[in-house]
Amino acid sequence: MSEAAGYKGLHLNDISGSAIGAGFLAVLVSYAGPLLIYLSAAEAMGISKDEFSSWVFAISVAAGLSSIGLSLWFRVPIAMAWSAPGTILLISLGTSLSPAEMVGAYIAVAAVLVLIGISGFFERLVKLLPPSVTNGMMAGILFGFGLKAAGGLATDPTAIALLIIVFSVCVVVFPRYAMLVLLASALIISAVIYDASVGTVSLAFARPEVTAPAFSTGAMLSLALPLLITTLSGQYLPGIGILRANGFKVSANPILVVGGVVSVAAAVLGGITTALASITAAFCAGPDSHENPERRYIAGVACGVFFCFGGIFAGSIVDILILLPSALIALLAGLALLQPILKFTGAMLASDDAQAGLITFMFTASGVSLFGVGAAFWGVVVGITVHFLTKATVSLSGGSK
């Protein structure tokens, strides 16, 4: 299946319950997993409930509109979402950057994504980055957050133990829905143990808030550069891989351009970069969506529609999530990252340049900050330096590594 020549519109006969269900499930999984990571970042940065509601509105609508437009244009199940690995960067940065500097970094990343898409440089750019280093950076970012997520055992041992038991059973019995069951279990535990007022949640609209951007060197190096790398290597690259593995020969270039454009609009409302969904793409692109690949684009459209509804009622989503104690939010977010941690760590260790990857991992996971610039940047700098010095030494010595 090659990419379509142009927009052909929605064919009503292509609509199916399985495709709509796949799109709905992709959105539910995004809200049950990656959004909890985003909430942890908001808590680490001291963001208010209204500000976070604006963030959720921005990322949901941006993901929704781009998913609908791209899926209809190419008749391919293109499910967009926010940069889940990128949200971990926010947690590591904490309060070191102002909201205005974050918006400036988001806009800078969006502009570069558009330029990469227009230039058609995506495939070559990804090849320039040593896989061992990018995998080491991703593993370090995720692992550092995972350690913090485990810290809740000291303050809420009963609740943490119950959720670990539920998770252990779910990943074996129905792994695809493990995070949904875990979120529901966490809400029940919050109501029973912590007397959370679950029954008081009602329909609440989003409250978008505009933030003027500010551009600083610290934000560009600490947030924009690592966010660009994680978005390209941790979202677009595996996302395109999933589409192609399911027979959809679509170019990454127009997806990058659209993702970049909607990211600018989302940024001024506080929303992090929109990208091809690597975590939930399999729900829409796989055979469970529909046995006929040519009708699976409906799943991408449905995913977009449900994301837009989620954005409109972002107030209700935030009201539900903030019922959870901080320790449970951190644990759920950490469990949602187990598979990505395993994936990037395994790829790093399997590389023929694992040493550079491990050094990148160490510096990134350390959380060290130098000259006001965060650990992810220094991890990449040290890793790339080791990578190329090692290659140069091997070449000069005439031997093999």
Image: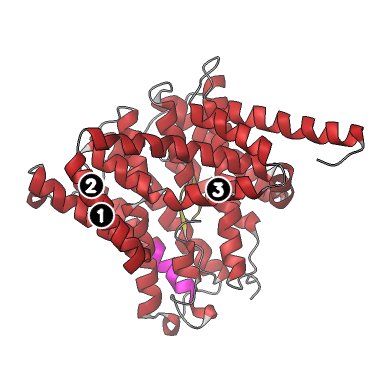
CA distance separating discs 3 and 2:
27 Å
What amino acid is found at the position of numbered circle 3 in the picture?
Answer: Phe
What amino acid is found at the position of numbered circle 2 in the picture?
Answer: Ala
> Do the residues under discs 2 and 1 have CB atoms within 8 angstroms?
yes
Q: Which mark is residue 165?
A: 1
- Residue lying at the far bottom of the rendered structure: 13
- In the image, which is nearer the foreground, mark 3 or mark 2? 2
The image quarter in which residue 36 lies:
top left
Q: Is residue 37 left or right of residue 2?
A: left
Q: Earlier in the sequence, mark 3 or mark 2?
A: 2
What's the residue at 40%, 64% (across, down)?
303
Q: Secondary structure at mark 3?
A: helix
Q: Which mark is residue 344?
A: 3
Depicted 391 relative to depicted 3: above or below: above
Q: Which mark is residue 161?
A: 2
> Do the residues under discs 3 and 2 have CB atoms within 8 angstroms?
no
Q: Is residue 348 left or right of residue 162?
A: right
Neighbours of disc 1 within 10 Å: few (<14), some (14-19), many (20+): few
Q: x and y percent of residue 255 in the render?
A: 58, 56
Quadrant location of the N terminus in the rendered image: bottom right
